[in-house]
Amino acid sequence: MLGKILVIGFGPGSFEHMTNRAQTAIQESECIIGYKTYVDLIQGLLTNQEIISTGMSEEVSRAQAAVKLAEQGKTVAVISSGDAGVYGMAGLVYEVLIEKGWTENTGVSVEVIPGVSASNSCASLLGAPIMHDACTISLSDHLTPWALIEKRIDAAAQADFVISLYNPKSGRRTRQIQEAQRILLEYRSPQTPVGLVKSAYRDRQHIVITDLENMLNHDIGMLTTVVIGNSSTFLYDNKMITPRGYQRKYTLHTEKQRLRPHERLRHENEPWALHQGKNDLHLQKAETAATTINPIKTGSLELALEALSKVKEGTASSDKKVIKTVHHPVVSVFELAVSPGIVNKQFTAKQMLTLAEVVGNDGKMEYTPHHQIHLRIPTANPDDITEKLEEAGFILEPLGDVFQLKACDFCEGEKKDSIPHAEELHQKLSGLPLPKELKVGFNGCGMACYGAVNDDIGIIFRKGKFDLFLGAKTVGRTAHAGQPVAEGIEPDNIVDVVETIIQEYKEKGHPNERFFKYFKRVGNIQGYTYQDMTPKIEIEPAPCGD
Ligand code: SAH
């Protein structure tokens, strides 16, 4: 009767993190073969098994002993920390078996029992650093040529993988980690988050969060796993987090932001995806050069600059070092809103040309019902775009959950008295981040033909004074106009009144809470009491798509 080899990955070291199968397999076995430290770690699970513990470097003899005992009919456990298939004993056991002509049908039975590998256990202690495409690289050059390890680090660094470095350093191998850091710094920012986890889930567990530049100033040893973030990994409350994707965008005056969950998967936010078809090649070029390529070259200066950048690229390719330093090849989507003015609704021909130029073939230009054109342009250089648009006389505003003033075009003379107030409100509040997008309609006469009462807040100039409407429900089948809360507000006060209301909503509104919902929830804003304006008719809710 032939026996059985159980190749067991027992996880990081604590019983809780060992799989149930690993535990029962240990109990089923008659002998346990493993590195002494590992045998000690599972001591508490042993009953009367024969123990064959060996030194660290005797892996081959451990595998051979296991095969021999199994051939004698024994059930043998070969133990590895983490997962036995990750720099563990599983491959070696098969190699020894293969040498002897083993096949599954004729030879001893083999069961490989998966375990939680160090990259997973260490990642869990660091936050969520892996999340995305990742790789493991062992820095041990005992069985692998250093030249190959170096190549792998280089390739992984270049391809922006999150990297778990196993076997980073030992008493004798100290230079490898320095070399690894040097290579990584050729592609990644010195501030790239790095996690060092020593003895995860063991008594001497020690966790350090640092960065690529400073990682060598901390203790790294045989029992450490080094987790290097990718170009999107960030630190939050001493946790390392890698977002699920690269989707990022930025709008006017903000840093790059990760997309909020509901914004993901929208085509416009995936300019790099395969489904964008023919644009791909173009984008890739833009990525490598880390510049925006404007397809329409209007002037000789631009042509000259483009030619110059091509010459620079050419030089770079003959010098490996220079090309390597072109890192973070992720183009983000820059989005913003443009309009010809707060009051002015007319575009000039030059403005239209400028729009076409900055949007190019890769960007998107969306005509909206809110007196704005929304632009979404993949670029690494938003400043060039804003500069051109401002030069063409556009008003630029951020997109998203911000304040927007929608004024009418103040068609006649007398109505013009109110324009300065509209402009003051725009100056003070446009672009202000709020719990949810908020539009203030500002109409210059009682006709209110630009529909101010149907905006979140409506202001109507009438007989030299202002009427105020709050809390329109602007969308849905139960949409309704705003509630008239005040008539005849003095022109000198209107900006203050609106500003105070907005500030209250900014401070006290829940994230994503629309203004009308906020008004309903609190019942009173700055002395104005809420009344239910919902139409009194039975109407079934109809979510989007139905
Ligand atoms: N089979 C193991 C890896 C063995 S190689 C696994 O899947 O996890 C040995 C290397 O693994 C160590 O140098 C260290 O980098 C990493 N390692 C193993 N256990 C660890 C632990 N508990 N905490 C941190 N790193 C660990």
Image (cartoon, rainbow, N blue to C red):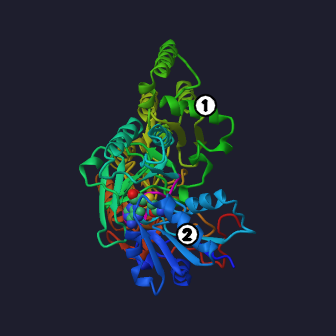
The answer to whether residue 128 is seen in the rendering is no
Indicate the quadrant containing the N terminus: top left, top right, bottom left or bottom right: bottom right
Rendering coords of residue 472 (x, y %):
50, 64
On screen, 103 above or below 522? above
The Cα atoms of the two marked residues, 2 and 1, are separated by: 57 Å
Say what amino acid the circle numbered 1 marks.
Answer: His
Residue numbers of the magenta segment: 122-133
Decide: few, some or many residues near mark 2? Use Cα within 10 Å; few <14, some 14-19, many ≥20. many
Q: Disc 2 on helix, strand or loop?
A: helix
Say what amino acid the circle numbered 2 marks.
Answer: Ala
Rendering coords of residue 385 (x, y %):
46, 32
Decide: few, some or many residues near mark 1? Use Cα within 10 Å; few <14, some 14-19, many ≥20. some
Q: Is residue 491 magenta?
A: no
**Total residue callouts:** 2
Tag of residue 506: none
Upstream in sequence: badge 2 or badge 1:
2
The answer to whether residue 131 is seen in the rendering is yes
Q: Disc 1 on helix, strand or loop?
A: helix
In the displayed structure image, the side of residue 542 where residue 126 appears, left or right: left
Q: Is residue 131 magenta?
A: yes
On screen, 227 above or below 103? above
In the displayed structure image, the side of residue 282 where residue 505 appears, left or right: left
Which residue is outermost to the right? 105
Check disc 1 and report the residue beneath it.
Answer: 282
- Badges 2 and 1: C-beta atoms under 8 Å apart? no
Check disc 2 and report the residue beneath it.
Answer: 66
Indicate the quadrant containing the C terminus: top left, top right, bottom left or bottom right: bottom right
Q: Nearer the viewer, residue 394 or 143?
A: 143
Residue at image point 53% right, 52% down: 133
